């Protein structure tokens, strides 16, 4: 196989399927790279994920060890971001909290995106009674305010990270199903789908191999734009005591337990606040950049 | 080979094809001509199984067709669409587009079949792993023709195969279709609004107006001006006018 080079990627006469695919991806990357804000967003997201993954290496203290003599300390060389109300190191808790918070976001997306995609594509492609049934179910979920419905789910189950993930996932999928259905309705009537139908392929094969891939770009954009609201919902559940339970560090929970000190020891709640803000903003910038690159209507 | 008997097609409460009947012999190329909106493409799509809501009799190769077509039908009947920009999946390479019918019908030796199909429609080897947007209109229509023929059908339905192409490319594609039809003994139905195209390829043709066939005539009648129906004469006069 030829060496991977710029010329190989940009060749207008690819010699294999893999080269054609990578060439197309490289073109997308080149387009994405022209948007500095989006690249910054991507860099921040990757950096946060790397920091969270490397938490055991980078943490200066055990995030669970209390030191009541040294509570609410301001940032110092010993405790880089100070300590919380129980004397635990904020920097270490922030790193480990990133694992929980970002982990929840990733788990929600892994649950939600395929579900929304399949429900939407099937409803849009099948039409008729299947479409009506699936869309009314979607409407039922859409009719409730997101946080309230998530609260009700968590209250029905026992509070914890898993229940929070399931609750957020249950409330987050309907918009994706709607989006995928709308895309499918336009794709369904194109000649290229008619041509696949003329090969005698089964509806399931047509949906999975021909329709769903066309819905993916807009869904990807929507997911990245929604990441911030998923983070905020996760943090909100944590803040209300229904997400991660103490002593597990989670950004929302960290703000909740430190909110009493916002006037005197303001850095204690502000630091996880900045983390949430930065992550949300980075995901939004990334989503905007992806939309410019992936949205088929803009190409 | 193809029998259409008293075919009616409805879109909702709107009947767009009325009582259409014609027969196509094996190896024959039959033309359907008419103004846009005359229902000619609808007849073709109904035969292809892409339109629900029809009644009447349809048979291909002696087998009557129901509302749902089986895989054997799609192996023997294929279609080339009007717009080569819309009939190729924008996210799939030529290779993947051609491999799909082979995968669906479980045909082995995909590799050699794809190479042969590309040669048959005179596409360069380098086009194999390109995306449709990297091809010209004529090349795209060649890919669509290769896709239609790759599973060896016996019937080819052509829905205005050249009307979205430049005039210079139209002749190339028409000649390609004429050659392939000859080499593979295909039975074809060609839909067009262009009498010159129909006259070039078809032995017999039906003239449609308002969803009905007004006249079925032979190619020679087109030339020597013995068409009976007023609408046919109108179309012929119009095409002479356009040719200058």
Image (spheres, coloured by chain):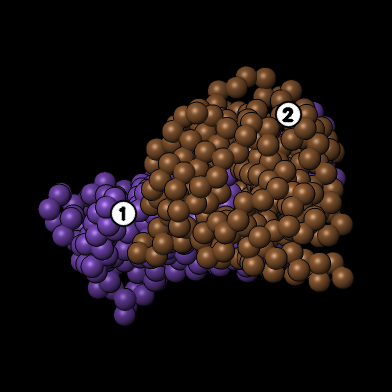
Chain colours: A purple, B brown
Image quarter (top left, top right, bottom left or bottom right) of the N terminus of chain A:
top right
Is B211 left, or right, of B79 in this rendering?
left
- Using the image, tell me which numbered label, if any, was put on residue A128: 1
Viewer-side residue, B58 vs B119? B58
Callout 2 touching callout 1 (CB < 8 Å): no
- Residue A186 visible in the snapshot: no
Q: Residue furthest bottom?
A: A263
Q: Position of residue B5 (x, y in %)?
A: 46, 44
SS class, disc 1 = helix
Is B29 left, or right, of A93 in this rendering?
right
Viewer-side residue, A139 vs B168? B168
What is the chain letter for disc 2? B
Q: Position of residue B98 (x, y in %)?
A: 66, 35
What is the chain letter for disc 1? A
Q: Quadrant of residue B117?
A: top right
Viewer-side residue, B224 vs A79? B224
Q: Quadrant of residue A286?
A: bottom right
Please give the name of the residue rendered at 66% of the width and 40% of the height, measured from the top-left corner. B188
Q: Residue furthest top?
A: B108
Image quarter (top left, top right, bottom left or bottom right) of the C terminus of chain A:
bottom right
- Using the image, tell me which numbered label, if any, was put on residue B184: 2
- Residue B231 visible in the snapshot: yes
Location of residue B46 with respect to A267 vertically, above or below: above
């Amino acid at each position: 196989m030829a060496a991977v080079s710029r010329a190989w990627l940009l060749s207008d006469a690819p010699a294999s399927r893999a080269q054609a695919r990578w060439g197309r991806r490289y073109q997308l990357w080149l387009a994405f790279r022209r948007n500095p804000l989006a690249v910054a967003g991507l860099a921040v997201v990757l950096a946060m994920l790397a920091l969270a993954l490397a938490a055991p290496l980078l943490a200066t203290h055990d995030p669970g060890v209390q030191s009541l003599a040294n509570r609410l300390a301001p940032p110092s060389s010993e405790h880089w971001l100070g300590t919380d109300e129980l004397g635990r190191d904020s920097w270490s808790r922030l790193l480990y909290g990133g694992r929980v918070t970002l982990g929840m976001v990733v788990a929600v997306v892994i649950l939600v995106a395929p579900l929304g995609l399949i429900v939407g594509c099937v409803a849009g492609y099948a039409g008729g009674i299947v479409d009506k049934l699936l869309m009314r179910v979607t409407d039922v979920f859409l009719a409730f305010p997101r946080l309230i419905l998530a609260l009700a789910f968590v209250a029905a189950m026992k509070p914890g990270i898993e229940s929070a993930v399931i609750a957020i996932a249950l409330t987050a999928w309907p918009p994706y199903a709607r989006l995928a259905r709308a895309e499918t309705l336009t794709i369904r009537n194109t000649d290229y789908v008619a041509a696949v139908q003329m090969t005698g392929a089964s509806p399931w094969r047509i949906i999975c191999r021909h329709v769903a891939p066309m819905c993916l770009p807009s869904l990807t954009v929507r997911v990245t734009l929604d990441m911030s609201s998923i983070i905020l919902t996760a943090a909100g559940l944590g803040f209300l005591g229904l997400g991660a339970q103490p002593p597990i560090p989670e950004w929302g929970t960290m703000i909740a337990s430190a909110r009493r000190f916002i006037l005197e020891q303001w850095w204690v709640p502000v630091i996880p606040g900045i983390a949430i803000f930065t992550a949300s903003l980075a995901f939004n910038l990334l989503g905007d950049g992806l939309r410019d690159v992936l949205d088929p209507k803009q190409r | 080979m193809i029998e259409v008997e008293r075919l009616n097609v409805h879109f909702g409460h709107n009947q767009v094809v009325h009582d259409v009947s014609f027969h196509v012999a094996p190896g024959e190329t039959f033309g359907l001509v008419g103004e846009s909106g005359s229902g000619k493409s609808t007849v073709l799509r109904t035969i292809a199984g892409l339109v629900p809501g029809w009644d009447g009799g349809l048979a291909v190769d002696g087998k009557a067709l129901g509302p749902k077509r089986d895989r054997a039908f799609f192996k023997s009947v294929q279609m080339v669409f009007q717009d080569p920009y819309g009939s190729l999946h924008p996210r799939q390479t030529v290779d993947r587009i051609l491999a799909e019918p082979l995968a669906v019908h479980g045909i082995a030796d995909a590799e050699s079949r794809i190479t042969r199909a590309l040669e048959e429609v005179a596409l360069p080897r380098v086009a194999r792993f390109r995306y449709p947007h990297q091809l010209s209109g004529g090349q795209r229509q060649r890919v669509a023709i290769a896709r239609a023929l790759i599973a060896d059908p016996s019937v080819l339905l052509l829905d205005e195969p050249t009307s979205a192409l430049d005039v210079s490319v139209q002749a190339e594609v028409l000649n390609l279709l004429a050659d392939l039809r000859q080499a593979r003994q295909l039975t074809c139905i060609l839909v067009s609004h262009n009498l010159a195209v129909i006259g070039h390829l078809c032995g017999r043709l039906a003239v449609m107006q308002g969803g009905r066939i007004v006249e079925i005539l032979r190619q020679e009648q087109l030339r020597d001006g013995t068409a009976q129906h007023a609408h046919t004469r109108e179309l012929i006069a119009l095409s002479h006018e356009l040719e200058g």
